[in-house]
Amino acid sequence: MPGNSFGNIFKITTWGESHGKALGVVIDGCPAGLKISEKDIQLELDRRMPGQSKYTTQRKETDKVEILSGLFNGVTTGTPISMLIPNIDAISKSYENFKDIYRPGHADLSYDEKYGIRDYRGGGRSSNRETVGRVAAGAIAKKLLKAMKIKTFGFVQQIGNIKCEKININYIEKNSLRIADKGKFDEMANLIDSVRKSGDSIGGVIEVRSTGMPAGLGSPVFEKLDARLSSAIMGIGGVRGFEIGLGFQVASMKGSEVNDIMVGKSKGKVKFRTNNAGGILGGISNGNDLILRFALKPTSSISQKQDSIDNKGKQKKLQVKGRHDPCLCPRAVPIAEAMVNLVLLDCILENNLSTVKKIT
């Protein structure tokens, strides 16, 4: 199975299944000389961890990371970094009753069509449990980017038809939904609670921003920064739409409304009147903040009865049991941040930077 690796220079390969013994990631291309610890990784994994509130899956995984290689005396050596996260709360028996039935909205059918075999326990490799390795790798990218004063943060911008009207970045990690508008918490929480109690789920929109961006990241043809970010985000399970800056709004606007006017330079950096482009022009960062958004579909696993077919094509009634997120959005925020950080670091390292000293 190809397609388990991501990145050009800072390259990661994730491994493991939802109900296997463990999951993990191998990072190749991390510069030597970075001080890193399991605590640094754990901080990010804890943000993604299941069972944090009634608005997420109740699967109880501690996601305790173990760094197996690539460090000496707490410092990266430039060799591959391998990290392992055990599964401790997988309940595979919940899937036995419909192991031969294709779950609507899931990859069950497409996996069978492609490989002729699939791990039905929690979706196996297609489960978003796989993203634990991405977040672990992203934690290292985040620390490297911090040395360059690049900061990435995300928040839930919309759940269902309810949208945040204000952005308070200090509120994001203080609430269980990771929204940026305190005034919308009760309304959004009640919506998720309502669909959860009815055995259903709800989708939403996440926004990610990166500040301190340098100009010059990305390439003008096939390796456009926005194309690479799109690939990174669309590779997260459940993502159904992606946009940069004004995104789809530009379809109904005029060029005079969309163009970001340059107004001068300050400390060697071009200043813009607006940031409609979301920080990218011609596939290359322009020094403005990076701004992107993506849409997440409602969780496919719902406890309501649904019609489906089995692997013989016979019609079946299906009721999915198990522990699932009624809304994917809150836990998707750290996953998206990790993927953005991985792209940004990879672009920076493509400038032939090979050690932390050269970066800092």
Image (spheres, rainbow, N blue to C red):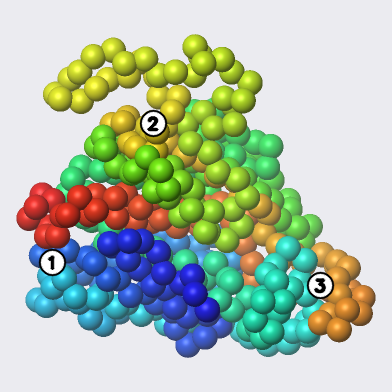
Q: Residues within 10 Å of mark 1 (few under 14, many from 20)?
A: some
Residue type indicated by callout 1: Ala
Frontmost residue, 310 versus 218: 218
Residue at 81% x, 72% y: name it.
319
Q: Position of residue 28 (x, y in %)?
A: 27, 71
Whole-percent x, y for residue 294 in the image = 55, 44
Please, what secondary structure does the residue beneath circle 3 have? loop
Q: Are marks 2 and 3 in contact (CB under 8 Å)?
A: no
263 relative position to 259: left or right: left
The residue singled out by tag 3 in the image is 319
| Quarter occupied by residue 142 | bottom left
Instruction: Determine the CA span between mark 1 and mark 2.
Output: 32 Å
Instruction: Give the structural element (helix, strand or loop) at label 1.
Output: loop
Of callouts 2 and 3, the N-terminal one: 2
Which residue is drawn at the image coordinates 25% and 43% (left, top)?
150
- In the shown orientation, is residue 328 left or right of residue 223? right
Crowding near the residue tagged with mark 2, few <14, some 14–19, many ≥20 C-alpha atoms within 10 Å: some
Please name the residue that numbered disc 2 is placed on.
Answer: 281
Depth order, front residue of 205/228: 228
Single out the mark in the foreground, 2 or 3.
2
Helix, strand or loop for disc 2: strand
Q: Residues within 10 Å of mark 3 (few under 14, many from 20)?
A: some
Of the image marks 1 and 2, the number of the one nearer the N terminus: 1
Q: Is residue 303 visible?
A: yes
Farthest residue in the front direction?
221
